[in-house]
Amino acid sequence: MTTGVPRSLEAAVEQAKDATRAAIQAGVSRILVDINIPELKIMPIAQQFYPVLEELDLTFKIYFPDAGAAALAKRDWDNPSFSIRGINEAKGRIEPDDEAFVIIEPSSVEVNDVEDFCNEATGCYVVMLNPKLEDIATIGIGYAGRQLRDRFLSTLESCYYLQPLEGVTLLRIYPGMWQVWGETEDDNYELLGEFPQKPSSEAIANLFENEDPEGQGNDSSVSANRPKKAGLFAELGQFIRALTQ
C-alpha cells in the first residue's frame, strides 16, 4: 500500500482502493471514501474506483443521487453487467446474492434514503464515495441533527480521506491513523502529526506552535524541511497541480 500524500489523482484513487480493500477484509461494513479536491469530476473517479469490488469477487450494485446520473453512468461505462440506479430507486431492491453497494456522492438531501438503505443492507458492505451527508443547513444543529449523528452518521467509518487545508494536507488511509502533512520548501511533504480520530482545526493549528526550537533558528538543514505557511489558495493551487500532472 502506498502511503504519504499522493502525487497524482490516479495515486489517490489507488490509495482509496487499498484502504477500501483493507476495510472490507477487516469486516468494516459502512465505509466512507473522501477525495476532497476542488472541482473534482466524480464520474471518472467512480469508474476507476469500483473495480476494487470486482477484485474482491463481490456481487455489487452502484447507486447515484438520482436516476439521471445513473443513466449517464450506464452510457459512459458502456452498460456494465452490474446494476446502476438512483438511490431513490434502491428501497426494497436488495437481493439475496448482493454483497456490496457503492453510493456515489450522496448529499444531505438523500441522507434519510441512505440511512434507510444502510439499515436494509445489513450483512452487506456499503461504500460511500465523496459523501456530503452532514450539511448543517439541511440536517440542523439541534436535537434532530444530534439524533441523526448518533443514530447513523456515527456508524460510518472514514476509511480514506484526503483534503488540502491551509498549509497542510489531511490524510487518512485505513487502517492507519489520521495524518497531517505539511509541504516543505523543497516541494516535498513532511509528516507533522498523527491522530487516532479526525483532528480539529485547532489541533492542526497547534502542530505549528513552537516550530522553531531554541537554538535551531538559523539551521538551514532544519528550516529547509519545515512546512511552509502558504495561503489557502496558494496551497490549493499547488495541490491541484500535483494531482493533475
Image (spheres, grey):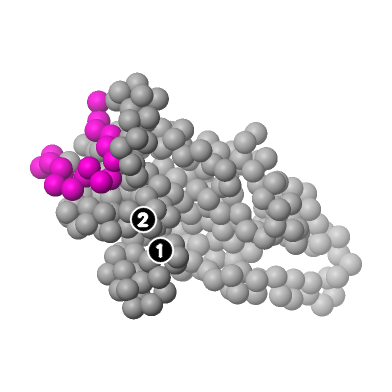
Amino acid carrying mark 2 in the image: Val
Question: What residue did someone put label 1 on?
Answer: 138
Residue 110 in the image: state x and y as whole percent: 33, 53
Residue plotted at (44% across, 67% down): 136
Residue 117 in picture, x, y percent from top left = 22, 53
Looking at the image, is 216 positioned above or below residue 75? below
Query: Taking the image as drawn, is residue 31 in sight?
Result: no
The reply, left or right, for residue 133 in relation to residue 243 is left
Q: Which mark is residue 101?
A: none
The segment highlighted magenta reads 81-97
As for residue 94 lying within the magenta part, the answer is yes
Q: Amino acid at mark 1?
A: Thr
Q: Residue at x 70, y 70 (%)?
A: 208
Side of 156 relative to 174 (left or right): left
User: Which image quadrant is residue 143 in?
Assistant: bottom left
Task: Report whether 240 appears left or right of 21.
Answer: right
Relative placement, left or right, of 92 versus 72 is left
Q: Position of residue 134 (x, y in %)?
A: 41, 62
Residue 109: image tag = 2
Query: Is there CB contact under 8 Å for labels 2 and 1?
Result: yes
The x and y percentages for residue 16 are 44, 45
